[in-house]
Structure formats: C-alpha cells, structure tokens
Amino acid sequence: MILRFAPLLLMVSALAQDGQPTLTLAEKEFQESMSGVTLNGHYTRQDVNGLSDDKYTIEKVSKVKGDLWRFETRVQYGAHDVKLPVELQVKWAGDTPVITLTNAAIGGMGSFTVRIVVYKGQYAGTWSGAKGHGGMLFGNIVKTTS
C-alpha cells in the first residue's frame, strides 16, 4: 500500500525542497555562523558621550529569497527585552555579509536604519532612528552554549 503512494510522496518532497532557496557556500557559512549566537557589544548615541551595552540573541537565521533573510531574535537594550522574527536584507561586499535595514519599523520599538558588517566573529555598523537618533554599534558574535 505504501509503495503505491511512493511517487506522490517523492513529488511532494521535491516540491517542498523547491520552496527552499539554494544557498551559496558563503550563504551557508553565514547561516551557520549566525544561528545560535549572541551579539555582545556596545552602541553609541550621537548626542551622548560614552558607550551603552547591548545584546542581541539570534536563535536562527534562514534565507527567505533573494537577499531577504529571516532572523529569529531576542533584542535587549536599555529597558527593552523583546523576542521577534525580523526579515532583513543581507548584501555582500565580496565575501563579507552586510545586514541592512532602511527606515523600517521593528516590533513596536520604532523605525530604524542599520548597516552592520559581519566578519570573523565580530560585527560593526551604524544605526539611526526615526527621531534623528543614531550612532554606531560593535561587538563580538558568540556561539550560545546549550
């Protein structure tokens, strides 16, 4: 009986796999290196001296299509501690991924623009908010231990 449905199961399996985007070697490495990590770092604000701590936990990163990626995140900064999926564009500067977001609302925290370069376990970039706030951010990417 099961053999009778084998061609149908194979076809459904093939269709499901077709829905998954094909990843280049660099994209596979990015996905693996950014899943199950915590970004521990600091950010600056343009009108304020000094550094503030921030932490972004990324449970999983997966490619949606083209340069669009889904980040399953937990964002912690200041009094905020929010868990949410975020879809971001990832552009490539040669072998280096650049996470980009332009004037987009993020889970009730406001609209932001960011450019974050990811390289060899570190990240650095710029950020700006809708109300003229902005600054820099940087830190280390650390694999989460289970």
Image: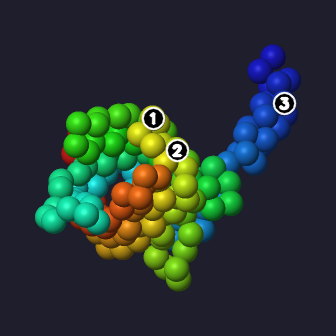
Q: Identify the image quadrant of residue 1.
A: top right
Q: Amino acid at mark 3?
A: Leu
Viewer-side residue, 111 vs 13: 111
Label 2 close to label 1 by CB (< 8 Å): yes
Which circle, 3 or 2, is nearer the viewer? 2
Residue 116 visible: yes
Q: Does residue 104 lie above or below 102 as drawn?
A: above
- 88 on left or right of 128: right
**Residue located at (77% from left, 21% from top):** 2
Q: Position of residue 100 (x, y in %)?
A: 51, 63
**Which dot marks residue 108?**
1
Label 1 element class:
loop
The answer to whether 114 appears left or right of 122 in the picture is right
Q: CA distance from mark 3 to mark 1?
A: 44 Å
Q: Residue furthest left?
A: 50
Question: What amino acid is found at the position of numbered circle 1 in the picture?
Answer: Gly
The residue at the point 28 percent across, 37 percent down is 80
Q: Residue at x 29, y 35 (%)?
A: 81
Residue at mark 2: 105
Q: Which element is circle 3 on?
A: helix
